[in-house]
Image: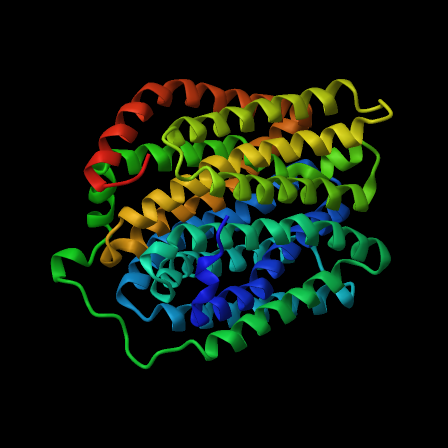
Amino acid sequence: MKLDALKSPRYRRFWLGSIGSTGATQLYFVGMGWLVFKLTGSALYLGMLGFAMAVPTILATLAGGLIADHGNRGRILLFTSVLAGVALGVLAILDLGQWVTVWQVLIIAALLGLISGFDLPARVSFFPALIEPHQMMSAVALNSILWQGTRMILPAVGGVLIALANTWIIFLLCTVGFALMSWILLGLQTSTSRVRNLQKDRGLGVAWRFIRQEKLFAALIAMTWISMFFGTSYVQIMPVFSEILGTGERGYGLLLSATGVGSVLGTILVGRLQSSPRLGSIMMGGSVLFALSLVLFALVTGLAADWPFAFAMTCGCAMLSAIGGSFFLISSMTVMQLAVPDALRGRVMGIHSITFSLIALGGLVLGPLAEIVSAPVAVLSGASMVLLSIAGFSIAFRRLWHLNGQDQGLRI
C-alpha cells in the first residue's frame, strides 16, 4: 500500500495530530466500558452506555454534516476537540475522587456522543482539502490504519493501565490526547470560511436525494449500517466475553486489540487489491468473511470457553472478522469519497459516518439479548442478520457496481 498522502505537509500534520484524538477515543471507549461494568456488573448497562453514546451522535451527525458544508471545517474540529478534552477531564476528576456514578458516566458519554456527531462529518470532509485527488485511496487507508492501529494497541495498554491503576488514568490520558489534537489544529486553521452553496443546495434533503439517485451509494451505506449495527456492535459487550473466558481486564483489552490487528491487516491487504478487476467481489467476500468469523466467535465462546486455547481461538475469530470488515469498509469509503461532490461531502459522508455510531447503538440490542439468553447467542443472532442482508444485497450490488463503475469512471 502506498503512503502518498503523507507527502502533503498539511495532511501529514493532521494525520500525526489525529493520533492523539483517535487514540483518546479508543481509550475512553475501553475505560467507560470497564467502569460501567465495574459499577453495575450488567450487560444491560453496557447496552445503555452504547445507547447514550450513539443516539446523540446520530442526531448531531445530520446537523454536523450541514454545518461542515457551510462552515469552516478546521474551526469545527478545533472546537469539538477542546470540548471533548474538557468533558474527559471532568470524568477523570470524578473517577479519581471516587465520586463517579453510572449515571454520570452515561451523561458524559452522551455529551461525547453529541460532540462526535459534529466532529465526524467535519473530519471526513476536511482531509480531502489537504491532499491531491490521486492521493485519496492512500489517505482513506491511512485514516483507517490510524483508527485501527490505535484500536490494535491501546485497548491492550488500557487494560494493563486499568489493572495497575484504575480507569481515571485512562480518562486523564484521553484529555491529553485531545489537547494535542487541538494544538495541531491551531496551525491548520484558515482565515476564510468555505464558499457558500446556492440556496437550493443548503439543506439535508439534497444529500439524501443524491444518495437515492446514486443507488450504489445507497446500497453501500445500507450494507455498512447493517453490518455495524448487528455485527461489529459485539465489541460493546466485550467485557462480558472477558468474564466468560476468565481473562479479566487484560483479556478485555487484548480482545479489543485483536479486532484492531485484523482491521490493520485488512486495510493493508485491500490497498494492494484496489486495482483488481474483481474488487466488487472482494468487497462482498470480505462481508461474508466478517459474518462467518462472528459465527465462529459465538460458537467458541458459547461451547468451548473452558478449552485450553479458547482465548486464543476467540482472538483469532475477532481478528478474522475485522479483516473481512476492513475489506468492505475501506473500498466502499474510497469509492464514495471519489464520487461525491465537494459541496455535498460533509452531508453525504456525515450520513455515512453514522456507521460508527451504530456500533454503540447495536449494543442496546445485544446487551439486553445477552442478559436474556447469553452473550454468544446474541452475537450469533447478529451475525445471522448480517448474512441475510448480504444474501439480499448480493444480486443488486453486482448490477449497481458495474453500472456506477462505468458511469463515474471508477476502476472496478
- Image-based side of 376 in relation to 346, left or right: right
| Point 40% across, 34% down: residue | 276
Q: Nearer the viewer, residue 341 or 384?
A: 341
Quarter containing the C terminus: top left
| Point 56% across, 55% down: residue | 146
Confirm whether residue 360 shows in the render: no
Q: Number of callouts in the render?
A: 0
Residue 314, x across and y down, in percent: 73, 30
Report which quarter residue 319 is drawn in: top right
Confirm whether residue 266 shows in the render: yes
Residue 249, x across and y down, in percent: 80, 46
Q: Nearer the viewer, residue 180 or 279?
A: 279
Q: Can you say whether 99 is above or below 402 in the image?
A: below
Q: Nearer the viewer, residue 45 or 122?
A: 122
| Point 36% across, 31% down: residue | 277
- Image-based side of 335 in relation to 324, left or right: left
- Image-based side of 303 in relation to 107, left or right: right
Residue 55, x across and y down, in percent: 46, 47
- Image-based side of 185 in relation to 166, left or right: left
| Point 34% across, 52% down: residue | 62
Q: Can you say whether 175 is above or below 291 in the image?
A: below
Residue 159, x across and y down, in percent: 77, 51
